[in-house]
Amino acid sequence: MFAWIETTDVAMWVALSLWAYPALLGAHIIGLAIVVGIFVVRDLRLLNFFSVLHPAAFLPLGKFAWVGFIINAISGVLLFTSQAVTFAGNVAFLVKISLIITGMVLAGVIQSRLRNELSVNIDTHISKSTRTIALISLLTWIGAIVAGRLVAYIV
């Protein structure tokens, strides 16, 4: 199946076009900056960094982070097509994808918990369990970035 994916017109365009791969990689980096940037700053705020920011400020940014995720998902799938066989067997790639899925699930959990906790208590008191999830989320996003960089070096 992965060998077939690499022979599709889209995969061939990504692999052989002078501009496709670099443009998709650029879009992937922009999506990464949006989604990881928002969630990492939010997680750090929940861990008592950046106390000048109110946690409620991150609630509407969740939608923008999903836009970044969609940009990443589309560009990532297109990039994947050009080297599907290689990526499908790459441990670093599989770890990266697993961590991204985990990070997005945690993002949804944190957004929901923030919405509930801030509706009950308008001050900035965030529960210890939400802070713990934020720490796990932060480590998950760091791990996804590290694994993403290792994809090029681990076969």
Image (tube, grey):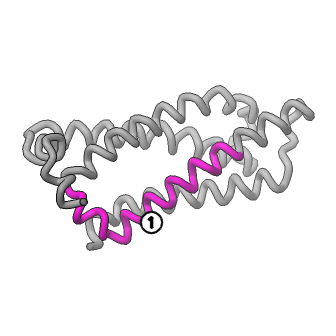
Could you tell me which residue is drawn at 74 percent across and 39 percent down? 112
Q: Is residue 53 magenta?
A: no
Q: Quadrant of the N terminus?
A: bottom left
**Magenta residue span:** 83-109
Q: Secondary structure at mark 1?
A: helix
Task: Please identify the quarter of the rendering in which residue 133 is found.
Answer: bottom right
Q: Is residue 107 magenta?
A: yes
Q: Which residue is tagged 1?
A: 95
User: In the picture shown, does residue 152 fall above or below 26?
Assistant: below
Q: Main secondary structure of the magenta part?
A: helix
Task: Please identify the quarter of the rendering in which residue 140 is found.
Answer: bottom right
Query: Residue 131: x, y in percent?
Result: 76, 53
User: In the picture shown, does residue 45 fall above or below 155?
Assistant: above
Name the kind of residue labelled 1 in the image: Val
Q: Is residue 19 left or right of residue 141?
A: left
Q: Quadrant of the C terminus?
A: bottom left
Could you tell me which residue is drawn at 32 percent across and 36 percent down? 27
Could you tell me which residue is drawn at 22 percent across and 64 percent down? 85
